[in-house]
Every structure is written in C-alpha cells, then in structure tokens.
Image: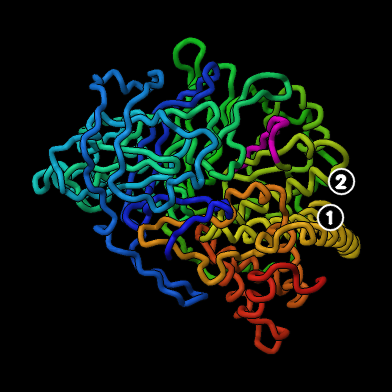
Amino acid sequence: MNIKLDPSRDDLPLMANTSHMLVKHYILDLDVDFGNGVIEGNIVLFFGDGNRLKKQSSSTQETFQMESEEAYIFRTVGPCHVPEMDSSTFSPKMGHKEFAVCGKGDQDAFDNNGNHDNQEHDSEISSSKYCCDTGNHGREDFLLVLDCCDLSVLKVEEVDVAAVPGLEKFTKASKLSATPEKLRREIVRDLVALPADAWREQLDCYTRCSQAPGCGELLFDSDNWSLQIRKTGAPTAADFPHAIRIWYKTKPKGQSVAWTSDQNGRPCVYTMGSPINNRALFPCQEPPVAMSTWQATVRAAASFVVLMSGENSAKPTPLREGYMSWHYYVTMPMPASTFAIAVGCWTEMKPKTSPSSDLMTDHALPLPRSEADFRCDNTCSHMEYPCRFQSASAAAQDIIPYRVFAPVCLEGACREALLRLIPPCLSAAHSVLGTHPFSRLDILIVPTNFPSLGMASPHIIFLSQSALTGTNYLCGTRLCHEIAHSWFGLAIGARDWTEEWLSEGFATHLEDIFWAEAQQLPRHEALEQQELRACLRWRRLQDELQNSPEGMQVLRPNKEETGHVSASGASVVKHGLNPEKGFMQVHYLKGYFLLRFLARTLGEETYFLFLRNFVHLFHGQLILSQDFLQMLLESIPENKRMGLSVENIVRDWLECSGIPKKP
C-alpha cells in the first residue's frame, strides 16, 4: 500500500511500525498536576514480535506480506549542537526545557510540508543528550516508531529487567548462556508469553520490571505525529530492547485530554474521545492490530477520584499528606485507543434503598435460548487471556457489578433517571448477547463540554448530563447504546478504523432491542416503538445524505484496500481528521438500516441466534465487514438467503454513497 496523504482529505496518520514490534503491555506511572494542567511521569512498554507474518482474511482470502524487519532502518545523521545535561535534567518533575532538534535520518512516511500539522507546531521537542552521537557514521540501526502528539518527551531508556530478582521461575532465559542484551530481550519475550492462568504472576512481574533501573539511554527524535527511537548497534527489531521506559509530560492543550470544570465548578480532566485518540496522553501504538494489556498508577490530590479503564474497582492508597494513589489493570488485550481516564471530584451515587420499579425485575425476559447457550464450542479463537466466555459463572451473570459517579450537584438526577435503569439494561443485554465481556462497569456523568451523549471504554462509560433530563426513554436508550459497545466496538473491534459502522451501526441497532427487553414490552408494543424510531432515523439519514459530500457517506471508504497497511505497519484513517465527520451519523444510521434489513430479511430469530454465535466466535478479535457478512450467510441455507451475497451487500451498502432503498 503506497501511503500518500492529501491534506484536503484530512486523513489521520497511524505511524507506528507494528510489523516489526508490537507492544504487549503498558505500565503508566503518572502524576496529575491541575495547577499546570499537565499529566507527567513515565510509561514502560513491553514488546513482543511484530505483525510480520502473512495474514489471510477468512472472508477475502487476501494475503498481506509484511516486509522484513531489516527494511525499516535509521541512518545516523550529521552533528547538531545540544547542551550537555546531567541526570537531574530528566526528572519527571522538571519544567519544560528547550533543546535543539536533530534532523531526521529517514524520510517520514507522511508529508512534512505542512500536511496534517498540529494546530500549534511543536518547536520545543526534547531530545536525548546523545541524539547527535556521530561515532557511528554509516551504521544502519532499527528505528522504532510510536504514535505520539502534543507530548514533551524528556528521556528514553532501556529497562534492565535482568536486575529483577525472582524472575527465573517464570522465564527460560539463562544468565550463563546469553549476553546481557540478549538476556533482557529473552526475559521479556518469556514474560509476555506467560499463560492466561498465570495472569496475577505476570502482572506482578511486569510491575517489578517497570521499577528496575535503566541500563542505557536510547536515542530519540520526534515530529508532529510520532516518536522515533533507536539504539546504536541494534540493526533489527530482534536486536532492539524489548522493555523501554519513556519519561514525558502532556501539554495543557494536548488533544487527547480535556482540562475543564465539572458542574460544581471544580477542576477535572478526562479523555473525551479525540480524533487522535490517546497519542497525546502517552506514546503508544495506535493501529488496532497492536492489542495490549495495561496497568496504571495515577497520583492526584486527595480530594480527587481517579476512574479508568480497569478490571478492578480501585481504592486509593494514601501517600504523602494530601495525596492519593490509584492503581488499575486490564488483562484483556485491546487497542490503546480504548484506554480512558477521568480525574475529578466525583461522588459515588448510591440508591437510598433497594430499587424497585416496573423496570426492575429479577430477570429480563430473554430471547429463546438453548441449553448450550448458543455456543459454537467450548474454546475461544482469540489470543490467550483470562476470558469470561470460558467461565460458567460469568456466563450466568446477567448483571455485572456497577458504580455511578457524578458531581454531587447531580445526585438527585442520577437517582431519578439513571440508577434504577442500569440493572434492567445490563440484564437485557445479557439476554440478547450472552456473557458480558467485562467483569464490572463504572458510569461517569461527564462535564458539560463533553461533545456527545456517551462514550464507552473497557469497564467505564462516560455519559452526558443531557441523558439525565426528560423521560426514561433518552437515558435508557443511550445507556443501552453504550452497553452494546461492550460487545461491538470493544470485545469485537474493527481491524480498519474506517469501518466504524461495525461499532456504531451495531450499537444503534442493538439499543432498540436491549431497551425493549429492559422495559419488558409485549412484542407488538416493542415493534411499534422500533418502527417509530426507524422512521425518525430514516428522516435524519435522508437529511444527512442530501447535505453531505458523497465520499463521506461510504461505510467502507477504502473499498478493496480496507485492512491493508504499509510494509512497516503504518497506515491512515481516511477522513479521520475531517471536521465534518464529527457531526455526521452515517456510520450509525446507514449501519443501523443495513442490520435492520438483514434481520428482517433473514428473520429476527435466525439473525439474533446467529449474532450470539458470532459474538462467541469473534470476541477478543478484530474483524472486517466480510468476516461478519460471510459467517452470517454461511449460517443460513442457500435457499433461504433471499438472493443475498457478500458481494452484493458490500457493493450496495458499504462501498457506495446513499442507501439502496428504504428498508
């Protein structure tokens, strides 16, 4: 794939060279500084092998060959002048300093002549004091590229994991038969490959390794969209350190987080679903294929509560006077873009008494199910991790533990509109799709500058205050939409971000099904409600199609190139930065009408039985449209497919503007 950006398209570059090395685990160790509006500290990245092997899609039968790891290299540059600094220069508490920036040895994969420039050009990029080492002219070193934007990187170093005692029982690496460099790499390779049932030991090893001393600074440079790191004398990814620590801090106007005030006027900060995702929060690999786990320790003043994507309901640990530390972890590998954090003076909202209402029953009425729970088999197809789909108790849990947080001034609204709706909505989702992919849920009512009605991340949902006003209808449907993302968008993600309909179309279609189940509506009333909503959506979609560029109406804009990346793993998200995209709902609405059409054509009972099977087969994985469509049609006898094929659905619905006909 030849990557060339046209600035008029406003595509979002994904720079990370994931074909060579993949981040398997992140450990963030951060301080939140509300006085200066920054988050600072360090992040340790643990790497495994890259995505170089041939990949063959079960639906398209297309094979993508990644180039060899030696092909992406860094050539040393001529000298530039950088002031000498002592080790104290790199303290995570330091103020920002201006350093000279070295020229780049490789041409960037993307145009640097103003295309996709940040709103404020970063002329203060920090560099290592060794970045201009000229003692190895002509040497070709492997270059690690991470997605990075609006960050001040202060120092990059290799982590001496071999100095951590007690790792011998978890690794096969021998201190006697390897050089120190090779030993460190082998320890990390063994650590990231530990089996799922050793996840507690693995997290403990990660934590202890992240606290190990550095064993050599690495050379680094930055541009508008990436951080480039190399080690002198490491010509390939196999020779590059597999555990590195990056000291950095965010910028007050960084695009990944919003510094604002809550409804009580108190300061807060949160990730608000930026088009550039999390690359202005921490250096990372943004491409969806870079699925990783993470741990995070975040320190803030004692008056603040830290909420985050995490499997555990973190409790604060007192530190020095007036400060608390919060720790979260995730063991299910997911793209770094799904990470979310919110720090503010939130209050946990609890019902005064045991809730009771017409929406609160012991069990929402399920769709028909078999004793086998519609499971295809007893194993999972994803990479190994401690999966809830393999747990009988998790499969039976229709309501997962949940908490609600909001500014104290919204306590009454939360009790009135939200708290009593959560159990029936969770139970309804379980009755339709089965096992909840995540073990718990936090819901946060976010500040008024939040740009949408809701946003789902692993274990946490951000909900707009607007959802608390009016009747149960708005709050209930929005809650159902975000809960649906646990399955479609999070547990099952799009391999190519341009196929946003695989997340939003499914969530929009499922919100009606979940909400009808949560209300316990008779079938005829549920159908009437869904018909009315379909009518309103149809009108909204027609208005949007008449007033938007045709190119923005296509659900699969990359067409036959969907899912392709460059040899290094870099790619672009078509229209990812287009300002019009944030106001469009075509992926929600057109995707909804496609799924409604398929369900009605094939029969709803058949469709939802299939969907449950699909979730069981593909959870924990990334998919393309063809994966869904092919499995759907293959599950139906040919004489009952009503003439549908993957090819004509892709042609008529996904790769053209407009909509075929009113469903």
Q: Is residue 318 above or below residue 632?
A: above
Callout 2 amino acid: Asp
Q: Residues within 10 Å of mark 2 (few under 14, many from 20)?
A: few
Residue pushed farthest bottom?
Answer: 639
Q: Start and end of the magenta stretch?
A: 440-451
The residue that label 2 is drawn on is 358
Residue found at x 40% / y 50%: 16
* Quarter occupied by residue 76: top left
Residue 419: x, y in percent? 76, 37
Residue 219: x, y in percent? 26, 37
Q: Are marks 2 and 1 in contact (CB under 8 Å)?
A: yes
Q: Is residue 450 magenta?
A: yes
Residue found at x 60% / y 64%: 557
Q: Quadrant of the C terminus?
A: bottom right
Residue 497: x, y in percent? 55, 57
Q: Is residue 229 magenta?
A: no
Q: Is residue 87 above or below residue 167?
A: above
- Assign a secondary structure to mark 1: loop
